[in-house]
Image: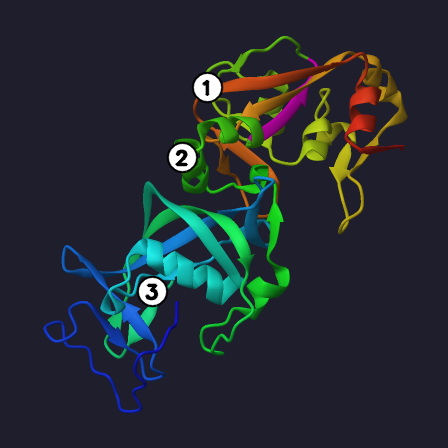
Amino acid sequence: MRSIIKYLTESTKFDPVKNKDGVYSKSGVWNDILWIRNKPYRERAEVLILNNNNEVFLEIRGNDYRLPGGSIERRLKRTGKKQVYEEAKEEARIIIKDTIDSGVIYKIDKPPAKWEIDEGLSYEGKITSIYIAKYDKQYKGFIHKIDRDDKMVKNGKFYPLSKLTNKYHIKAIKKVFPDLAAQNMKMYRSGHTQNIKMFNPKNPDKAHNKQFRSKNLIYATNNPSYAAGFCFDWFDKEGFRFGRINQNPWLLEMPKKYKNRLNQKCSFYELESASFKKIDVRTPEYYSEKSVKVIKEIKFDSCYDCLEKYKVQIRFI
């Protein structure tokens, strides 16, 4: 992303005629520019790296994650495919192979703060192409400090595909490897209603409508334990509390007078994930405005059994 082919110590004034494809910063970092309607955008490529277990390489940061990726350096005559090869090597220290252009491209407009390129010019947004590649081997060679990403090397790991939440990343996997996506990318929810084949936002569960904000959305999560915590109807105003501290198990606190609710039957549902969007970075909740197909239903004779299976602790208060 930050490869140097020239180091400039003098001031770099941006000239749209001389520097129509990009510009170097004072530190010598090349900044590629893609002009859209006379506005400068950053043209990027990022890569979903899969290992032999069909897990994807991610650097997870809180409720978000990063992939190896960066600006396409057209000045070095790099294609997107060549760029992600270099990014994977520099940022993740991974050599990739069998790289495929997914054909999925997404654009981010009007960022909260414009990305500064150099004096007198800022990016108006980003255009990102998504590639998918296979893990080949670790790269053990030299990487210049300006190109290294020590945090990604230290914290990056291979995770199940179900960890993907960016709808474009999900779309790319589904487009290139549809069978793999169907097997590995899921969202979860539970409830006392059984035998559901399709969740419809025009007629969602009443309990979830009261618990959350909208009457015409389907709510789910990529965290099985969190989903299990809603296997029966409960509400904050009744004195229920549900949460976790750090990496401790999820804890459901409930008044003793509602203990009998745990005896009812319930179902745990695995859902397709492509249409879901994140509600808030502070919660594991997602929503969909479209109908969602059930991949699998697991039935339980009691909510006790469901909570136990997905490691949710119960405390009566």
Q: Position of residue 53 (x, y in %)?
A: 61, 40
- Cα separation, mark 3 vs mark 2, equals 33 Å
Observer-nearest of 146 and 35: 146
Task: Classify residue 160 by image quadrant.
Answer: top right
At label 1, the amino acid type is Ser
Q: Which residues are magenta?
A: 186-192
Q: Is residue 310 above or below residue 262?
A: below
From the image, tell me which residue sits under label 3: 114
Residues tagged 3 and 2 counted as in contact (Cβ below 8 A): no
Q: Secondary structure at mark 2?
A: helix
Q: Is residue 90 above or below residue 193?
A: below
From the image, tell me which residue sits under label 2: 176
Quarter of the picture holding the C terminus: top right
Q: Is residue 8 above or below residue 199?
A: below
- Cα separation, mark 1 vs mark 2, equals 23 Å
Q: Earlier in the sequence, mark 1 or mark 3?
A: 3
Quarter of the picture holding the N terminus: bottom left
Observer-nearest of 99 and 265: 99
Residue at position x 60%, y 49% in the image: 158
Q: Is residue 44 above or below residue 149?
A: above
- Cα separation, mark 1 vs mark 3, equals 36 Å
